[in-house]
Amino acid sequence: MKKLNILSSLMIFAGLGVAHASLLDATSNKLETTSQTISATKDAVDSTKNATDALNNLSSVATGSAATSTSTLEKASSTLNSAKQTVDSAKDTLNSAQSNLNAVGSLTDTVTNAASGSSDILNSATDAAVTAAKQKAEEEAKKKAAEAATNAVGSLFN
């Protein structure tokens, strides 16, 4: 009966790990979309900068304002590059978190196979491993997402 309880508990924890992994995949997909949007915006800014540079060459009257516009666009392009790098870093963190969850799943399988009379100890070890992996993954993902959002918002005001 204890083995059945352990197996039931481990199956529940494995299910939670799969659900958490799905959430991480969805977040990773959102970050990929954000990264693509940032890249498209950066390309648009770069195109505008190129157009501004062309206008600089054609119009001596607009030289002062075009130079200011070019400088502003260069700064925006640089800021968008930084935001994209932060998003890419967040994606890498999510991939790492996914790997951690896979390792927890493997550990859960190992614990299930080794389950015997020490069910309480095995349950505690599994709980601790799953909780630690989830907390680490969530903390890293939140940190990277917050950093990306802060950088993107901060760039709008600079």
Image: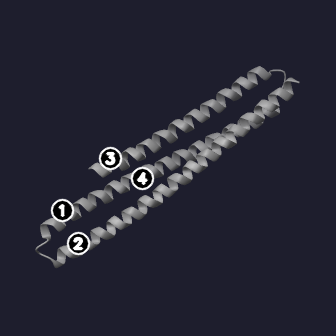
In this rendering, is residue 50 above or below 22? below
Residue at image location 51% in from the left, 50% down from the top: 91
Residues at marks 2 and 4 touching, judged by CB atoms closer than 8 Å: no
Q: CA distance from mark 2 to mark 3?
A: 26 Å
Q: Which residue is mark 1?
A: 68
**Secondary-structure class at tag 3:** helix
Mark 4 lies on residue: 85
Label 2 to label 1: alpha-carbon separation = 11 Å
Q: Amino acid at mark 3?
A: Gly
Q: How is the image coloured?
A: one colour
Residue annotated with mark 3: 154
Residue beneath the point at 85% across and 23% down: 2
Q: As drawn, is 131 to the left or to the right of 8? A: left
Q: Is disc 2 surrounded by few (<14), some (14 to 19) or many (20+) residues within 10 Å?
A: some
The secondary structure type at the circle numbered 2 is helix
Q: Nearer the viewer, mark 4 or mark 3?
A: 3
Residue type at the position of mark 2 = Asp
Q: Quadrant of the N terminus?
A: top right
| Disc 4 from disc 1: Cα separation | 26 Å
Left or right of 118, for residue 145: left
- Quarter of the figure with residue 51: bottom left
> What mark, if any, has residue 53 been given in the picture?
2
Front: mark 4 or 1: 1
Name the element at disc 1. Answer: helix
Mark 4 vs 3, N-terminal side = 4
The mark that comes first in sequence, 2 or 1, is: 2
Residue 36 x %, y %: 47, 60
Q: CA distance from mark 3 to mark 1?
A: 20 Å
Mark 2 or mark 3, which is nearer to you? Answer: 3
Upstream in the sequence, badge 2 or badge 4? 2
Name the spot of residue 45 as percent of width and height, x first.
Answer: 33, 65
Q: Position of residue 24 (x, y in %)?
A: 59, 45
